[in-house]
Amino acid sequence: MDTDSHTDTDTAATDTAETAERLPRGAASAERVVEAARACFAERGISGTRMGDVARRARMSRPNLYSFVAGRAELLELVALARLHELGLQLEERARGLDGDVGEALVDQIIETTRLGREDPEFIALADAMPRFALTVMLTSGDSPIHKINARIFGPLLARAMAEGRLRSDVPIDALHEWLQNIVTLLASRDDLNDEAQRTMVRRFVLPGLLS
């Protein structure tokens, strides 16, 4: 019996925290699994890739593959996290290069983060293939690895606002990062808003929640 048939049904309850805990064990091999999956997805498409394909590409047995991921849903999540980590590094570097008013820099960074999440072909394909609940938890939970990625994306600008005495001090900065994480997820789903409409919304409703 092909065990691929059971993986799509027995992993719906896999949560993001468990995914994060799997990564440190044999990090080099986990990275190999992610690289193999990405290569298979690029060649065969996500729907056309089976767990056995990934195992062969990673040069490991299927049982060994399942020591890193419980099934297909968790594999998709790991690959999505890998892509978001890459985008996060780009956005962190971008944040460090923004100058001018820190409020406008924050607006610009929020809009660019939203744009990348909405337009990146690899991430879009992975998000479309993931179970909706798992995707929502991954993108919005403070316990998700996305939270650390988000902190890197906005950390330089929030630190600058703090140094200028403009960052609100009645809320922990970690909570501000989590709130921004949810704001970006919300805006990414609003494809009915053009760039200027999004900027206006962020200026009116998000900046007052960040800056004093």
Image (cartoon, rainbow, N blue to C red):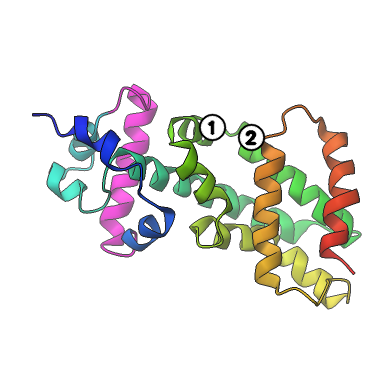
For residue 124, side relative to residue 103 (left or right): left
Contact between marks 1 and 2 (CB within 8 A): the answer is: yes
* Magenta segment, prevailing SS (helix, strand or loop): helix
The tag earlier along the polypeptide, 1 or 2, is 2
Amino acid type of the residue that numbered disc 1 sits on in the rendered structure: Ile
The kind of secondary structure element at disc 2 is helix
- Marks 1/2: CA–CA distance: 7 Å
Residue ID for mark 1:
124
The residue range painted magenta reads 23-49
Give the camera-side residue of 132 and 101: 132
Residue 174 visible (yes or no): yes
Asked if the stretch drawn in magenta spans residue 47, the answer is yes
Residue 169 in percent (x, y) is at: 81, 77
Question: Is residue 3 depicted above or below 143 in this figure?
Answer: above
Give the camera-side residue of 203 and 27: 203
The kind of secondary structure element at disc 1 is helix
Give the camera-side residue of 63 and 92: 63
Corner quadrant of residue 9:
top left
Residue ID for mark 2:
118
